[in-house]
């Protein structure tokens, strides 16, 4: 098996479940040692189980760190724990890959948006990635071999109703992606990916009204058509039952695109928002 990331070190935020866990699986399969970050106590056992599985399957090293990356103290804890665990016997320490995956979404129409929703969502989705990159910058490679991948969303471009705040955070993250690509050009490439609907609790929590509102996009997304005999019967039936008309992405499909951007093959790609949405957006 090809292991193009053998011996490298990656930090993935929000990595205990969903897309984050799938990205961890992808990078581990490529030989990358991993720091699995998570926030809530309820994720502790999930993170530990994932770490054990990745170490056993791929012979890598892992570290689980519970820290709120939307706070300066949380980021300091994350980077300090990483440095303590992965500094070599000769005293060298390098962070090769950062995947800013942690994020929250709280839909609300304009009159119902609260200050708490605004502050929480921007703190996690925008401030968190900035704080982590700030803290990690001194330890990034000096030869452009590093990789930063930011998890954006089609919501930055589609104008989904109810997502004034969430969509705004993802647009901000894309703007920072372009700035970081210039400022960190001698250290690493910096790219974003923009998933659309993805399997998991976040997608399942959408209201029928929200799903009806995005049905037009889903129906015109080339790769979201459910495939009887390929996709499970449950997936095919769910696409009919929820009224969306199509299936969400599988987490491994999004993870594959993130993993690709972390390899040496992606060395000439930076400052981009790379499609991870089955063709829902073809202009971005």
Image (cartoon, helix red, strand yellow):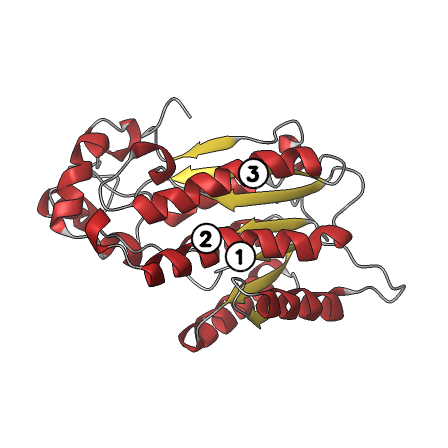
Neighbours of disc 1 within 10 Å: few (<14), some (14-19), many (20+) = many
Instruction: State the image coordinates of residue 137 (x, y, percent, origin top left).
Output: 72, 51
Residue 125 — which label? 2
Instruction: Locate residue 201, reporting x and y percent.
Output: 29, 59
Q: Nearer the viewer, residue 122 or 74?
A: 122
User: SS at mark 1?
Assistant: helix
Q: Which residue is mark 3?
A: 177
Across and down, in percent, residue 147 comes to 65, 42
Please identify the quadrant where the N terminus is shown: top right
What separation in Å lies between label 1 and label 3 (alpha carbons)?
A: 13 Å
CA distance separating discs 2 and 3: 13 Å
Query: Mark 2–mark 1 contact, CB under 8 Å?
Result: yes
In depth, the one of 177 and 83 nearer the eye is 177
Q: Which mark is residue 128?
A: 1
In front of the other: 20 or 115: 115
The tag earlier along the polypeptide, 2 or 3, is 2
């Amino acid at each position: 098996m090809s292991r193009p990331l053998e011996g490298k070190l990656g930090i993935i935020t929000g990595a205990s479940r969903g897309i984050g866990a799938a990205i961890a699986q992808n990078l581990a399969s490529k030989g990358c040692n991993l720091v699995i970050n998570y926030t809530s106590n309820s994720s502790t056992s999930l993170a530990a189980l994932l770490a054990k599985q990745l170490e056993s399957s791929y012979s890598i090293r892992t570290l689980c760190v519970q820290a709120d990356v939307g706070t300066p103290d949380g980021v300091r804890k994350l980077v300090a724990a990483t440095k303590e665990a992965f500094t070599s016997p000769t005293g060298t320490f390098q962070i090769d890959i950062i995947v800013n995956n942690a994020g929250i979404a709280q839909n609300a129409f304009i009159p119902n948006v609260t200050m708490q929703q605004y502050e929480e969502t921007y703190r996690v989705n925008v401030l968190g990635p900035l704080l982590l990159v700030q803290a990690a910058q001194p330890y990034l490679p000096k030869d452009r071999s590093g990789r930063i991948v930011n998890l954006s969303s089609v919501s930055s471009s589609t104008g989904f109703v109810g997502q004034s705040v969430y969509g705004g955070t993802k647009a901000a993250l894309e703007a920072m992606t372009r700035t970081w690509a210039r400022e960190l050009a001698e250290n690493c490439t910096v790219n974003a990916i923009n998933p659309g609907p993805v399997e998991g609790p976040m997608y399942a929590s959408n209201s029928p009204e929200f799903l009806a509102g995005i049905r037009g996009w889903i129906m015109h997304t080339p790769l979201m058509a459910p495939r009887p005999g390929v996709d499970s019967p449950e997936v095919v039936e769910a696409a009919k039952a929820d009224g969306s008309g199509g299936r969400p992405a599988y987490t491994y499909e999004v993870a594959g695109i993130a993993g690709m951007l972390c390899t040496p093959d992606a060395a000439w790609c930076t400052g981009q928002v790379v499609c991870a949405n089955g063709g829902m957006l073809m202009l971005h």
